[in-house]
Image (cartoon, rainbow, N blue to C red):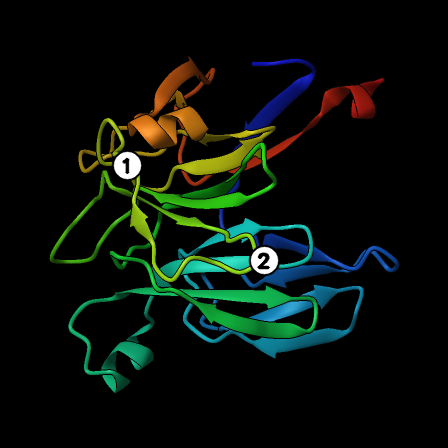
């Protein structure tokens, strides 16, 4: 991997997930409750504040941007599924939040999914491409090898619809992703046979145009549903 930047993966089970939107002055963070709890609220740590999420967020995937966070897909709880008379349990909703709460509903995913990986790629011209990949599409589709992308626009908004992205080499459930400079790394996951993967795959703008992921390495241990962050180790370790 390039320079002094590295991505670090570690196991985590049932912990509340930090979503990443923050106030620079007070260093408050937006937090989604644990997926094992039957609640659809978010909390601002240090801000004594909480609010309702627009859609069920179990096994959704969050994309952290500088001043907001985007929740993609997820599982419907039994109450919601019954109210919607929905025979499946996944949804395709995409919502953006900031430190104050709900900001906007964004274009829905092409394929409803949960347990997927997601992130973004920053283009050389300053544009952003959102990426979701893998996961499970419910009873009808099962585990997925598909990916979807959504481009930002020059005016600061988003394209009107997600478009197909590069397919994964195989269907992967519960991978984890993190941006690394102008790339997105997708790590681990498992398949329908409960085989856990140690792969580290990379997607960049060239891969977006040519529709391919590149395997750039392996982790020391196969893992899924892990935590993953990216950072400059020089600034941390000196």
- State whether residue 91 is above or below residue 178: below
Residue sitting at x 58%, y 74% = 102
Q: Quadrant of residue 166?
A: top left
Image coords of residue 80 (percent x, y): 32, 79
Image coords of residue 84 (percent x, y): 25, 83
Q: Residue furthest front?
A: 154
Which part of the image, by quadrant, shows the C terminus?
top right
Q: Which residue is mark 2?
A: 156
Q: Which residue is mark 1?
A: 172
Q: Earlier in the sequence, mark 2 or mark 1?
A: 2
Residue sitting at x 62%, y 50% = 65
Label 1 Cα crowd, 10 Å radius (few <14 / some 14-19 / many 20+): many
Disc assigned to residue 164 = none
Task: Answer with left or right where residue 199 lies relative to residue 53.
Answer: left
Q: Is residue 203 visible?
A: no
Asked whether 167 or 28 is in front, the reply is 167
């Amino acid at each position: 991997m390039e320079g002094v930047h590295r991505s670090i993966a570690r196991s985590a089970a049932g912990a509340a997930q930090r979503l990443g939107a923050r106030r620079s002055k007070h260093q408050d963070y937006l937090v989604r409750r644990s997926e094992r709890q039957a609640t659809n609220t978010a909390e601002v740590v240090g801000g004594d504040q909480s609010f309702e999420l627009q859609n069920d967020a179990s096994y959704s995937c969050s994309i952290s941007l500088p001043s907001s966070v985007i929740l993609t897909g997820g599982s419907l709880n039994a109450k919601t599924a019954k109210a919607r008379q929905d025979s499946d349990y996944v949804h395709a909703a995409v919502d953006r939040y900031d430190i104050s709460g709900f900001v906007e509903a964004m274009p829905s995913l092409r394929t409803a999914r949960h347990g997927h990986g997601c992130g973004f790629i920053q283009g050389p011209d300053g544009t952003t491409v959102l990426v979701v990949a893998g996961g499970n599409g419910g009873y009808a589709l099962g585990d997925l090898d598909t990916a979807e992308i959504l481009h930002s626009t020059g005016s600061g908004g988003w394209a009107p619809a997600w478009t197909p992205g590069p397919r994964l080499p195989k269907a992967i459930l519960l991978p984890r992703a993190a941006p690394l400079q102008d790339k997105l790394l997708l790590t681990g996951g498992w398949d329908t046979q409960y085989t856990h993967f140690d792969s580290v795959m990379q997607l960049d703008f060239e891969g977006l145009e040519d529709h391919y992921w590149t395997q750039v390495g392996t982790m020391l241990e196969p893992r899924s549903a892990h935590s993953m962050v990216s950072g400059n180790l020089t600034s941390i370790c000196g």
